[in-house]
Image (tube, coloured by chain):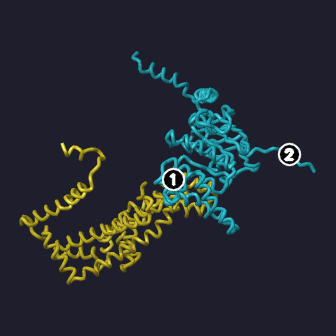
Chain colours: A yellow, B cyan
Amino acid sequence: MQLARWWVIRGALSSREYWALAGLGMLLPLLAWLFVSGAGWVPKTFLPTPLEVLQRAREWLMEDELLTHMWISMYRVTAGFLLSALLAIPLGLWIGSFRPVQALFEPLTDFVRYMPAVAFVPLVMIWVGIEESAKIAIIFIGTFFQMVLMVAEDVRRVPMAQIEAAQTMGATRGEIMQLVIFQSAKPAILDTLRVTMGWAWTYLVVAELVAANSGIGYSILKAQRFLQTDKIFVGIMLIGLIGLLTDQLFRWVHRQRFPWLYRKS
Amino acid sequence: MVVSQIVTAKIRIGAAQKVFRDGAREVRALNDVSLEIQANEFVTLVGASGCGKSTLLRAIGGLETLTAGKIEVDGRSIAGPGVERAMVFQHYSLYPWLTVSENIRFSRQFSVNRRDVTSADVEIASGRADALLRLMGLQAFARAYPNQLSGGMQQRTAIARALMSRPSILVMDEPFGALDAQTRELMHDLLLHVFKMESTTIVFVTHDVDEAIYLGQRVVVMAPNPGRIDSIVPVPLPAPREQDMKLSPQFLQLKKQILERIRATSGLGSSKDLLEQLTREAAPA
């Protein structure tokens, strides 16, 4: 039986088969959507057809400043994400390298990260206000605490032998931090940034709950009020698409910056 | 004024104690260990697991502080790692983001090597790195990354890197433990060559008795519970060592003697006893 080899645990798969299956995985839901929405079984406010969604996307782009909404959302996500990375990387480096710093910050961070970012919306409005900074603050709250813990974990995974080898070669503590630990953890940290970037996007809709009048998240919320289901679809898929592209960009940078990870004899 | 001419050992370990605490449990990794190692001597440490051989080695490297006792190098008590004692680890110690050549030169960027540096020093260091690449047979791999190399090549790089700043002592923690048997034999002869060329002092931990005898001028047999020196076995084999010596009656006699001591002190009894015990337990009542 041909298919028997597909069920070998961790078995091999040719790249042709891989891409065929991947394409099928994307195509099947689309066909199902096409079929269910086209059959006229459900009202279009419940499920619009793919064509209606495409038309809405075109309309939004031409007449309703889709790009402006996209840029402002991208700005908010990027700003919140960068701010969080700027603080999380050094802090994570410290937590992962020094036990007292870990004791001081890690339990606290663990505690805060379980607090739902959505619940901070009213607080942020009181503390930060309703300006752009408030939206950035929500995305920051959603990503920062996770990022700190993940970076600390990346740093802890640096092999002790790499550190001890540097010690016996006469490196100072600062040199070990900078030339060994940070360098060694860099690929893992970039992967952490890639994963947390995805989370930053998921907090966008929450962030744009705060007195926004622009952005994709805001547009989705507004479309709901007018029962523009097709527009909700456009917004959600757009976020998915931007996320996918950013993810690929991070992977590309990873391959460019850390060639030794991809080079085998 | 009388200047006393005392011949000091290269490394002097005096009544070394190391106690690890794990909650209420106390483990005596080293109990009253004293040992002198002469300059340009090759000493190997063997023993059953838990005998403290690695702890002792790491203490010499300065990576482990003693609970009591002291270690002197050239008559001076050590406190932490020092550039005169370079360590080679079993694995994962190379920097995967640097090429072989960059790994070897890695320590050049440390401030300790940049103080009062002249252009002549830089030239010497550069020549030194090239010489080490050649000595270790790594010229063709100078620009390769560690994960492109075999395990043996990786360890050659680690040894070359350790030798870069001309340490007087090489401290080696089972450096060939992860290599296959054939590669290990090649590494033994290479290391003996390096030992001769660089005239360093080598302290070498292994769990392989053949390796300990073949490389060492003295084999220090350690025993567990508490970690201590059981016996010190001089190896009267002539230098240069050759692979065929491993089959000589003299070599086999030494191996038998050392293995007997390891088995006697391992706390497991002999493997024969263990087998008998297992057979008894498995037999139906």
Q: Write down the residue under mark 2.
A: B5
Could you tell me the amino acid type at mark 1? Pro
In the rendered image, the residue lying farthest to the right is B1
Which mark's residue is nearer the viewer, 2 or 1? 2
Depth check: give the residue in front, A188 or B191.
Answer: B191
Q: Quadrant of the C terminus of chain A?
A: bottom left
Q: Write down the residue under mark 1.
A: A159
- Residue B173 relative to residue B147: left or right: right
Residue A152 position within the rendered picture, expressed as x and y whole percent measured from the top left: 47, 59
Depth check: give the residue in front, B44 or B242.
Answer: B242
The 10 Å Cα crowd at callout 1, few under 14, some 14 to 19, many 20 or more, is some
Residue A129 position within the rendered picture, expressed as x and y whole percent measured from the top left: 38, 78
Q: In which quarter of the image is the N terminus of chain A?
A: top left
Q: Are dots 2 and 1 on a single chain? A: no
Is residue B218 something that shows in the picture?
A: yes
Quadrant assignment, res B103: bottom right
Could you tell me the amino acid type at mark 2? Gln
The 10 Å Cα crowd at callout 2, few under 14, some 14 to 19, many 20 or more, is few
- Residue B205 relative to residue A195: left or right: right
Report the chain holding disc 1.
A
Q: Are the residues at dot 2 and dot 1 in contact (C-beta closer than 8 Å)?
A: no
Distance, label 2 to label 1, CA atoms, is 45 Å
Report the chain holding disc 2.
B
